[in-house]
Image (cartoon, grey):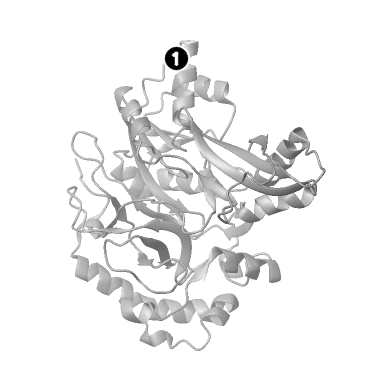
Amino acid sequence: MVAHFDELETRDPAAREQALFSALPGFLKSATEAIPGLASWLDGIDQHSVIDRAALAKLPVLRKAELMRLQTENPPFGGFADPRALAGKHVFLSPGPLWEPEGAGIDPGAAARAFFAAGIRPGDIVHNAFAYHMTPGGFMLDAGARALGCTVFPAGTGNTDMQIEAAAQLRPRAYCGTPDFLKVLLDHAAEQGKDLSSLRLGLVSAGALFPSLRAEYRERGVNVMQCYATAECGVIAYESAGPDGTPNPGMILNEHIIVEIVRPGTNDPVPDGEVGEVVVTTFNQAYPFVRLGTGDLSAVLPGMSPCGRTGKRIKGWMGRADQRTKVKGMFVDPQQIAEVLKRHPEVARARLVVTREGERDSMALHVEPASGQTPDGKALEASLRDVTKLGGAVTIATPGSLPNDGKIIADERDYNR
């Protein structure tokens, strides 16, 4: 059996680094000529000098809040997309809100490697339970699986009973979707007496794969790997499996991207092993980014993977550098909570608390009433769902009881369990 997706995954690390930085100056030149937003952002930069990591580190980090501002001022893409590359492609709207055009090629999110590393092979049937509505996740993983040679059932989200019926008849070998929805499918299928034993492999993203949940899947005969992806950059890193299907340590960085770990709130790279913000430079002609700050925390893991891939590894997702938090595969932003409060002047302060109930994400909006006011919990729940597109409970708190720590969103999930 072929052990790797292609020869790029096992090349000498120095050769990989040289290839990336040899290509970068030319890419910057062509991208800034075609894309005015990127040209403005990098104004005054000598593009020919960006030939190594030290030179790259002198460029500014573009963070999501700044990108959102630029898109608001110059909709829809803030001048960062090449209109010539959009013909025949999709355009997505992710929470934030942020507009994202689809990249070029048959695998614009570079997801095929992640499927292969998870043990999925050409000819396998993949049950894709990522959303195909507005956001890019469903299309990104769909394209990667098909580029690998898989057959994809575009299940999307919701309609659990119909998904179970479809999987019982189609007999897919692999699942891709958010980490916890697979448990929903397996649990409901067991209750209904439906046979989903064909599912043997999984590739999950858009949320944390908790160790206890991965262990439960393994007990049920499904080996689940995870990949780390963003709407703007596609698959940034992915897990690989050992001979017995267990995950190797860390996540391997994808080919054709440059990843740095920087001190949060700065442009400065941190030493290997230190936790910082993941910053990505892509070679996406349609929607290029140079030092895009993801807001996610991670750290470089020393050494190489036991699987033989020579790419640099990171420890995986280790939290957020800001308070933007992923719930059920969707980002919730502090600005969205602010929007809820604008609709309800009877609320003085609020704090969204994200927890786990069993193996599923849960969120509750804790609100303090304004002086002399009585908030309507049902109306607040409706506003929360309307703004975030996610359901959540509302708890009316005693005035002055919410912590005064600056947090609008508190992620209280235990990622070590």
Front residue of 277/242: it is 277
Front residue of 108/374: it is 374
Front residue of 210/106: it is 210
Q: In the rendered view of the protein, which quadrant contains the N terminus?
A: top left
The residue positioned 53% from the left and 54% from the top of the image is 323
The residue positioned 38% from the left and 74% from the top of the image is 268
Q: In the rendered view of the protein, which quadrant contains the C terminus?
A: top left
Q: Measured from the top left, where is residue 113 in percent x and y?
A: 33, 50
Q: Is residue 106 left or right of residue 202?
A: right
Residue picked out by circle 1: 190
Q: Let me know if residue 131 appears in the view.
A: no
Residue 97's quadrant in the figure? Answer: bottom right
Q: Measured from the top left, where is residue 140 in percent x and y?
A: 48, 49
Q: Residue furthest front?
A: 400
Q: Let me know if residue 309 appears in the view.
A: yes
Determine whether 85 is above or below 102 in the image.
Answer: below
Determine whether 134 is above or below 166 in the image.
Answer: below
Front residue of 135/56: it is 56
**Label 1 SS:** helix
The residue positioned 72% from the left and 52% from the top of the image is 339
Residue 211's quadrant in the figure? Answer: top left
* Circle 1 Cα neighbour tier, 10 Å, few/some/many (<14 / 14–19 / ≥20): few
Q: Measured from the top left, where is residue 107 in percent x and y?
A: 43, 53
Q: Amino acid at mark 1?
A: Ala
Q: Is residue 65 left or right of residue 224?
A: right
The residue positioned 55% from the left and 77% from the top of the image is 34
Q: Measured from the top left, where is residue 338 in percent x and y?
A: 69, 53
